[in-house]
Amino acid sequence: MLCVKKEVNRMIKKSEQIIKTLKYNIRLPSFMEGNRMSEKDFTRNRKLPFPQLINFLLSSPKHTLQKELTCFIQKSSDFSNVSKSAFCQQRIKLKPKAFIELNEVLINEFYTDNTINVWNDFRLLAIDGSTLELPPSLEILEKFGYNNKVNFTPMAKISTCYDLLNEIVLDSEINPNKTNEYSMALKHIKKLKKTDLLIMDRGYGARWLFNHLSLKKINYVVRIQHNFGEDIDSFWDSKENSSIIEINSLPKKSELRIKELGMEFVPFKIRLVKFKLENNKVEMLATSLLDEEKYPLEIFKDIYGLRWGVETNYNHLKNHVEIGNFTGFLPIIIKQDFYASMLISNIQTLILRDAHEELQKKKQDNKYKYKINRNLSLGFLKEKVVDILVSDNPKFMEELKKLFQLEPVPIRNGRKFERKDQKYRKKYYINQRRAL
């Protein structure tokens, strides 16, 4: 089993402190000025001014839009109501990058002067991509593209860089459906540090990418498959379980790739490790962790197994946060909803982290350790997030933490579940939202 530790000599920064910084930034005139479409936007005294608009979109409106607006206004202002039309006119003045910037504020606050979970002084990060079905409109089709020429369903490619031990989305991308996952991964990699260990599936196994990570001094563990080159394929059939090889040249495809990206090639070493799974299938990984004493063979099965966290987070994002449940038919709305959902997911993680610490103290004498129910806690956050964002009264946060601790889930180590092919899910209909 991997030994996960917390960084020492640091304070534990509470969710209230980080959310307070978020609220401060939302109210800054400079933040509004940098995230409005024109200088004239948000200058008049409207029912839904800039901070209120941001807060409403962070309230995760997934049900009937007018009902959501009415409930929000009744909680957050003196006005009796805001029409759906007035809201739509206001939101198209807002740049989607506002939520990206707020997420960066949250991330910087979380990782600065705070206690975080690490392994061997590394943050364990995973990059993975997926797809989202989008609402049908001509504007969205033109911007994002479609899945095939039969039904022309609008689709987008998405990608996230996820902290596996701290459950924070460090970076996210939503792009046209034709976008290559490698190009999105490169954007994520720009934000990584030398103290990060990147874990990726076989879809990202490429020599040019290993070269790029080597030049940036980013460590990695990547699953690779057969037909990766004679020098590596021979390792599959050998009796060795760990071997270090030097990459002195690249295949033509990788050479073309680094030229297109303006990169250089410098010979580098990689370590190959392989192990058997429970079904006797052999898995092989390529890694930059060359020190065989410091990083023995036995740790890699568990390290790579942690990558499953990014998959379960996609399940949380899609089925609980409902990142595919959009509130409009314009590309700008798609991006607003997507990046707002990533931010609200991180806010949930912050509060969940505090609630989990309190829960462990209460359950310390129990047979099992317990964790917070992510789906249930998200529902409670939905009900309380407006109070937290518009009020400085600490009672709302304390009430929410107590709600998070209801119906905790026991952690039973060693349980395994087979991965099943997901059946097609009915899409979300914007004009047929739940009112309850």
Image (cartoon, helix red, strand yellow):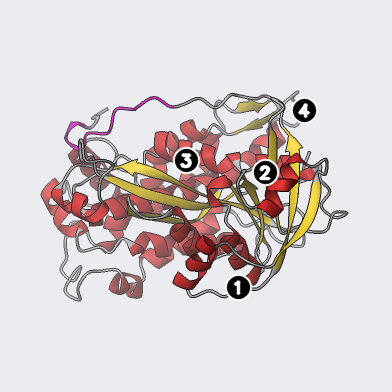
Side of 428 relative to 255 (left or right): left
Task: Determine which residue is flagged by label 4.
Answer: 365
Q: Position of residue 359 (x, y in %)?
A: 65, 35
Task: Determine which residue is flagged by label 1.
Answer: 265
**Disc 1 or disc 4, which is closer to the eye?**
1
**Does residue 424 belong to the magenta stretch?**
yes
Q: Position of residue 261 (x, y in %)?
A: 47, 71
Residue drawn at (22%, 69%) of the image: 37
Tell me which label, 3 or 1, sits earlier in the chain: 1
Mark 2 residue type: Tyr
Residue drawn at (46%, 26%) of the image: 421
**Disc 2 or disc 1, which is closer to the eye?**
1
Between marks 3 and 2, how big is the CA–CA gap?
A: 17 Å
Between marks 3 and 1, how big is the CA–CA gap?
A: 34 Å
Tell me which label, 2 or 4, sits earlier in the chain: 2
**Disc 2 vs disc 1: Cβ atoms closer than 8 Å?**
no
Evaluate whether residue 132 shows in this view: yes
Task: Determine which residue is flagged by label 3.
Answer: 314
* Label at residue 304: 2
Between marks 3 and 4, how big is the CA–CA gap?
A: 33 Å
Q: Which residues are magenta?
A: 422-432
Q: Nearer the viewer, residue 262 or 1?
A: 262
- Numbered label tally: 4
* Label at residue 424: none
Residue 203, compared with residue 383, is above or below; it is: below
